[in-house]
Image (cartoon, rainbow, N blue to C red):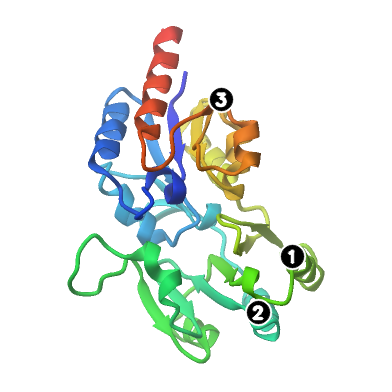
Amino acid sequence: MIKLFALDLDGTLLDSRSILRKENIKALRDLEASGVRVILASGRVFSSVLYQAQKISKDPVLIANNGALMGMDYDKLFIENPLDFTILEKLIDISIKNKLKFHFYSLDTYYSNELDLESLDHLRKDIDYGLNYQANLDISNDPLLKLKTKGESCYKFLINGIDKSKISRDSLVTIIKDRLNDQVYITSSYEDAIEITSKGTSKLSAIYGLCEKMGISKNSFAAIGDSDNDLEMLEKASLSFAMSNANDKVKNISDHILEDNDGKAISQAVEIIKEHNRCLI
């Protein structure tokens, strides 16, 4: 019996304009009404995942920063796995020496040393007035100092612009692993970037933690995604779904390949889960 459905956001639940469409909200609310808990599991900053999750559930539980954070709200966190400041210093140094763009997230803030509007597109709200982002923005010459001054923690570090740099993706990963002595978890949600969290964090580890908290079997969840940071949870899910816009690695390990994120993939997955559960009654 499926008790929990974990959904990636970008490239999966959100359409190509980063919009959570009304038909997807309705489908997921119907699924929750049938007794299946809907969980958003994303690499995004916690505030952004919460912004989307509140459109679906009155009391959402969400996974952010690829599993570094899991909880219901800012003051109701069940998992917190921040990166050490010494690790952040090394990641910033690696980025600057290789002339790569970077940013990192606290619970609700996007930190960087430059204003890169393209990197912020996915965080725009569905409104056209006021502070139009799903996270606070803090751009400064020394973002790590600002983080420390505010007494905040960092939960994910992202390096992008790799396809335009002189260093290859594989070489960059090797440098990070060598400098940090295998103290981090490295993954990606799109080809031009790598995402770094503390060792032992992943969407899957957060899902397992939630299953334990809910008192349900680790085998009672379904998952849907499109990118490398979804691979672990898809491999272990009792029902796994890949978007048609997913990469080949995701498609190869998934039970079902659905429409793309501009199509009816979410409704398709919901009906398959409902039918699966009906057959077990």
Q: Secondary structure at mark 3?
A: loop
In x, y percent, where is residue 43?
50, 56
From the viewer's side, name the closer residue of 127 and 107.
127
Query: From where the camera sits, is residue 75 visible?
Result: no
| Structural distance between the alpha carbons of marks 2 and 1 | 12 Å
Which dot, 3 or 2, sits closer to the camera? 2
Amino acid type indicated by mark 1? Val
| Structural distance between the alpha carbons of marks 3 and 1 | 31 Å
Give the side of residue 179 with respect to residue 164, left or right: right
Task: Using the image, determine if residue 168 lies above or below residue 85.
Answer: above
From the viewer's side, name the closer residue of 169 and 1.
169
Q: Mark 1 highlights which residue?
A: 173
Circle 3/circle 2 CB separation < 8 Å = no
Query: From where the camera sits, is residue 247 visible?
Result: yes
In x, y percent, where is residue 88?
63, 76
From the viewer's side, name the closer residue of 52 and 227.
227
Amino acid type indicated by mark 3? Ser
Q: Of callouts 3 and 1, which one flags the residue occurring earlier in the amino acid sequence? A: 1
Q: Which mark is residue 238?
A: 3
Give the side of residue 54 with respect to residue 269, left or right: left
Q: Secondary structure at mark 2?
A: helix
Farthest residue, direction left:
129
Q: Of callouts 3 and 2, which one flags the residue occurring earlier in the amino acid sequence? A: 2
Q: Mark 2 highlights which residue?
A: 95
Amino acid type indicated by mark 2? Ser
In the image, what residue occupies the spot 57% across and 78% down? Answer: 101
Q: Of callouts 2 and 1, which one flags the residue occurring earlier in the amino acid sequence? A: 2
Circle 3/circle 1 CB separation < 8 Å = no
In x, y percent, where is residue 247?
59, 44
